[in-house]
Image (cartoon, grey):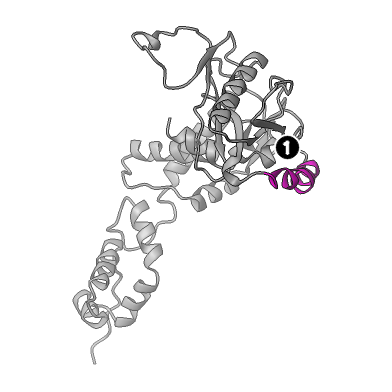
C-alpha cells in the first residue's frame, strides 16, 4: 500500500480552487486536479471569505503557509508616523490612519494592500492607542438635557409641521481639524495651532431630504482672485476678516429665506445651532426659528448624523 502524501496548497492555488468552485466544477474533480482529498476542497470552500481577504492583503501569494507578520513593516511604519504626528500635536483619526497605512503600503510595493477596521482596531490595541477629547474644548455634551428636549420640546413642535417643512441648519468649517484625536494611553491630548485658512458654510435641508437650500458661504476676502471674470455666484457669498458667521449675516440670510417661503406659501420650522451669532430677534412670518439647547449639538444636531460628513467627501 502506497503511503499517502500530504500536500500543502499555496494561497494562489486556494484562490484558483475557489474560482473553479464558483464555475460549478465538482469538488471531486478539483481535488483530483490539485492532488488533494475532497475534504480539503470542502475546508477551502468554508474559509472562502478569509482566503480572499488574505489574498488581497498578501504580497506573497505563492507562500504555502500564512505569515502572521506579513503586514509587520506597514504596522511599524504607521506607528512611527503616528508618533511623529502626535509629537507635533496633529489630531489623528481612524480614517486618516487607514489612508496613511494605504500610502505606506503602496510605497513598500504592496499594491494590493487594503486595510479593514478589524486590522486597525488590533493595531490600536497592541499599542494602547485610544480616542480622547482634546484639552481646551468646551465642556462635554449634556446627555440629560438633549434627551429631555427631544421628548418634551421637539415632539410638540413637530406636531404642526409636515416633514418637508422641518429644516435644520448648521455651520461647516473648511479644513477644520477634529476636536478629538487618537493618542497613546496616558498621554495628554494637547491642542495644535488652529488652521487659519477657513471658510464658513451654512448647510440646510429639510427632514425628508426633498429640499436642500443654497448654502451661504462666508470667506475672508470680499473679492478673492478666484472670483475674477465670474459674473454670478451659484450661492450667496459674504466676507469678514475671520470668515465667521455674524449676527448681521445671520439676520440677512433668514430674511431672504423668509421671503422665499412666503412666495411659496410655505411655513417652515428651522432647527438651529446654539451660537452667539445666531440671534433670535428677527421678525419672520413664515420661518419659525428654534434653537438647540446648549452643549447638545453633538448629540441631537440632525446635520451631524452623517450629512456633513457626506458633504465633505464631495469637496
Query: Considering only vertical position in the picture, is 241 above or below 155?
Result: above
Depth order, front residue of 217/89? 217
Residue 244 visible in the current orientation: yes
Residue found at the very far left of the displayed protein = 33
Quarter containing the N terminus:
bottom left
Quarter containing the C terminus:
top left
Name the chief secondary structure element in magenta. helix
* Image-based side of 227 in relation to 252, left or right: left
Depth order, front residue of 204/23? 204
Relative image position of residue 197 (x, y in whole percent) = 52, 15
Relative image position of residue 256 (x, y in whole percent) = 57, 21
Determine the residue positioned at 73% across, 37% down. 296
Determine the residue positioned at 61% across, 16% down. 249
Which residues, given as a range, are shown in magenta? 143-160
Is 265 a magenta residue?
A: no
Relative image position of residue 92 (x, y in whole percent) = 56, 33
* Image-based side of 164 in relation to 133, left or right: left
Residue found at the very far bottom of the displayed protein = 1
Depth order, front residue of 150/96? 150
Determine the residue positioned at 63% across, 44% down. 128
SS under mark 1:
loop
Label 1, residues with CA under 10 Å away: few <14, some 14-19, many ≥20: many
Is 158 a magenta residue?
A: yes
Query: Considering only vertical position in the picture, is 34 above or below 151?
Result: below
Query: Considering only vertical position in the picture, is 52 above or below 87?
Result: below
- Report which quarter residue 196 is drawn in: top right
Q: Name the residue under label 1.
A: 296
* Image-based side of 183 in relation to 72, left or right: right
Amino acid at each position: 500500500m502506497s503511503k499517502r502524501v500530504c500536500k500543502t496548497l499555496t494561497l494562489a492555488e486556494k484562490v484558483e480552487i475557489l474560482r473553479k468552485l464558483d464555475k460549478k466544477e465538482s469538488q471531486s474533480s478539483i481535488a483530483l486536479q490539485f492532488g488533494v482529498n475532497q475534504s480539503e476542497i470542502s475546508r477551502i470552500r468554508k474559509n472562502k471569505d478569509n482566503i480572499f481577504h488574505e489574498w488581497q492583503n498578501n504580497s506573497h501569494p505563492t507562500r504555502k503557509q500564512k505569515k502572521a507578520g506579513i503586514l509587520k513593516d506597514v504596522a511599524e511604519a504607521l506607528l512611527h508616523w503616528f508618533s511623529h504626528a502626535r509629537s507635533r500635536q496633529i489630531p489623528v483619526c481612524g480614517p486618516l490612519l487607514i489612508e496613511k497605512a494605504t500610502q505606506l503600503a503602496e510605497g513598500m510595493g504592496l499594491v494590493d494592500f487594503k486595510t479593514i477596521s478589524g486590522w486597525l482596531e488590533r493595531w490600536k490595541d497592541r499599542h494602547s492607542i485610544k480616542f480622547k477629547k482634546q484639552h481646551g474644548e468646551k465642556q462635554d455634551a449634556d446627555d440629560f438635557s438633549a434627551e429631555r428636549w427631544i421628548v418634551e420640546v421637539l415632539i410638540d413642535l413637530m406636531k404642526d409641521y409636515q416633514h418637508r417643512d422641518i429644516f435644520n441648519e448648521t455651520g461647516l468649517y473648511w479644513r477644520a481639524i477634529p476636536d478629538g484625536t487618537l493618542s497613546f494611553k496616558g498621554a495628554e491630548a494637547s491642542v495644535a495651532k488652529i488652521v487659519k485658512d477657513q471658510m464658513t458654510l451654512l448647510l440646510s435641508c429639510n427632514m425628508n431630504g426633498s429640499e436642500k437650500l443654497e448654502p451661504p458661504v462666508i470667506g475672508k476676502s470680499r473679492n478673492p482672485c478666484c472670483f475674477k471674470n465670474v459674473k454670478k455666484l451659484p450661492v450667496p457669498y459674504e466676507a469678514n476678516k475671520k470668515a465667521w458667521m455674524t449676527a448681521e449675516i445671520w439676520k440677512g440670510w433668514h430674511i431672504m429665506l423668509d421671503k422665499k417661503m412666503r412666495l411659496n406659501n410655505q411655513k417652515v420650522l428651522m432647527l438651529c445651532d446654539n451660537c452667539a451669532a445666531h440671534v433670535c430677534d428677527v421678525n419672520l412670518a413664515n420661518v419659525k426659528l428654534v434653537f438647540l439647547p446648549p452643549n447638545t449639538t453633538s448629540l441631537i444636531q440632525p446635520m451631524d448624523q452623517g450629512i456633513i460628513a457626506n458633504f465633505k467627501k464631495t469637496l
